[in-house]
Amino acid sequence: MDLTEGFCGLVAWAAGISTALATGMSTVIALWWRRTDKRRADFLVFGMKASWRSKDAYSSHDSPPTVISQVANVGDGAASRLVVTGIGCCVKIEAVQSNVEGLIPWREQFALVPLSAPGWKARMVIYCEPDSWDNAYVVMAWTESPTWRGYRSRRTQWMRLDSIAPLPRYGNYESNHHKMLFVQHEEPPKPVLPEALKAEVPLPRSGRLSLLARLRMDRQLRRGLPPPDVDGQDVES
C-alpha cells in the first residue's frame, strides 16, 4: 500500500513539473512572438541631391555643403514624437503647407513631428562642414507603441551622413559651347557654414565619436535629454 501511494505521488509530482514547464515554455514563446511580430517604424532616406556651389553670375555668395532629400517611414508601425538630430551637422525637416484655398504653398520647418504614420514622408535638408562630413550622423529618435512606457519605448536610428550622400565637390556649372559643364574650384577657407547652420551637436576635438560617447549620446536621445558633452572623447578605432 505504501509503495503504491509513493508511486502515485511520484507520478503526480512529475505531472506537476511537466505542466509547469509546458506552461512556462508556452508563455515565453508567446511573449517572444509578440515582441518579434510587433509593428515597428523604419525610416528611409531617398532622392538625395548633394551640392556645394560657389559664387556665379546669378549669386553673390557661396552655397554651403548641402544634402536635399526625402525621408519616409517605410515600416509597418507609427512613430510618435519624432525628433531628428544632427551629430556634427545641422538637419532641417520641412513639409509643404498651403493656405485654406491651397494657392500659396510654403515650407514649414519642424523641430518635432507629433506622429509619423506608415507612409509619412517629408523633405530633409542637411548642412555640414566639409571636415565633419565623413564622421557626422543623422539620428532619428521616436516613441513606439505602447507610448505610456515613456523612455522605455523610445527608439533611435543612426545614419552616417557619408552613407546618405558623399561630400559634393565645390564648384559650379558653366556654359561651354552650349553645354553646361561642372567646373571644380579651390575650396574656400573653413569654416564655411554660417552661425545659423552650425552643427546641432558638435563632434569632439578628435573629429570622431568613440563607441562609449555614441552609447552615452544614444541613451540621452532616447530619454529626450540634451546629448552629453563629448569633447575630449577618444578617437574611434
Image (cartoon, grey):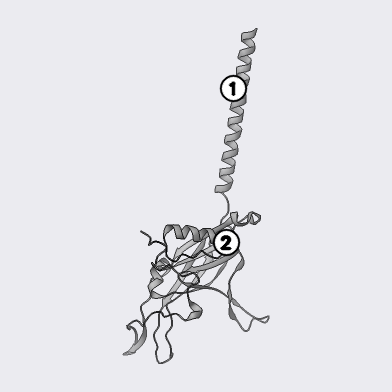
Q: How many residues crowd around disc 1 within 10 Å: few (fewer than 14), some, or many (20 or more)?
A: few
Q: Nearer the viewer, residue 107 or 215?
A: 215
Q: What residue is at 63 percent from the left and 56 percent from the top? A: 150
Image quarter of residue 16: top right
**Residue type indicated by callout 2:** Trp
Q: Residue furthest right?
A: 100
The quarter of the rendered structure image containing the C terminus is: bottom left
Q: Residue furthest top?
A: 1
Which is more N-terminal, label 2 or label 1? 1
User: In the visual, does 53 lie left or right of 86?
Assistant: left
Q: How many marks?
A: 2
Image quarter of residue 121: bottom right
Residue 204 at what x, y percent from top left?
43, 67
Residue 213 at what x, y percent from top left?
45, 60
Looking at the rendered structure, the secondary structure element under dot 1 is: helix
Residue 142 numbered tag: 2
Residue ID for mark 1: 14
Q: Is residue 153 above or below residue 133?
A: above
Image quarter of residue 122: bottom right
| Alpha carbon distance from label 1 to label 2 | 48 Å
Q: What residue is at 57 percent from the left and 39 percent from the top? A: 28
